[in-house]
Image (cartoon, rainbow, N blue to C red):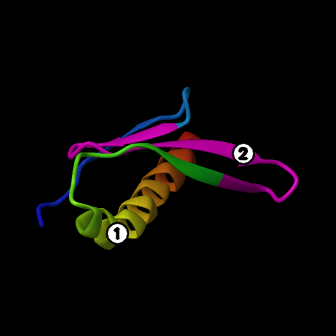
Amino acid sequence: MKDTKWTVDLENQTVESSDGWKFKFTHDKAHAAWDGECVRYPELEVSELARVSAMKARQAGDAFREALGRAS
């Protein structure tokens, strides 16, 4: 599997991957946490989506947290 490049847009609170994934993050102020939701994914076989979706969500969350850290 090739390395995925992630692009973070802090203004819109989104993270997009070079291979077609997009996550939207919302701030849960009550728990001082960020929640991510997959809003777009590439057309893949169901088995492939199941295999990689958790990894992509983790990578997107990592990219978002890194960008937040650099911005503060």
Give the label, 2 or 1, closer to the camera: 1
Quadrant in which the C terminus is drawn? top right
Pointer 1: what residue? 50
On the picture, is 32 further left or further right than 23? right
Q: Secondary structure at mark 1?
A: helix
Q: Position of residue 13 (x, y in %)?
A: 55, 35
Per the rendered image, the range of residues in magenta is 14-34
Q: Is residue 68 magenta?
A: no
Question: Mark on residue 33?
Answer: none
The residue depicted at 54 percent of the width and 28 percent of the height is 12
The vertical placement of 14 against 36, above or below, is above
Quadrant in which the N terminus is drawn? bottom left
Instruction: Give the amino acid at mark 2.
Output: His
**What secondary structure is the stretch in magenta mostly built from?**
strand
The residue depicted at 23 percent of the width and 47 percent of the height is 43
Pointer 2: what residue? 27
Q: Secondary structure at mark 2?
A: strand
Q: Position of residue 36 (x, y in %)?
A: 57, 51
The vertical placement of 52 against 63, above or below, is below
Residue farthest to the top, as pictured: 11
Neighbour class for label 1 at 10 Å: few (<14), some, many (≥20)?
A: few
The vertical placement of 57 against 36, above or below, is below
The residue depicted at 21 percent of the width and 60 percent of the height is 45
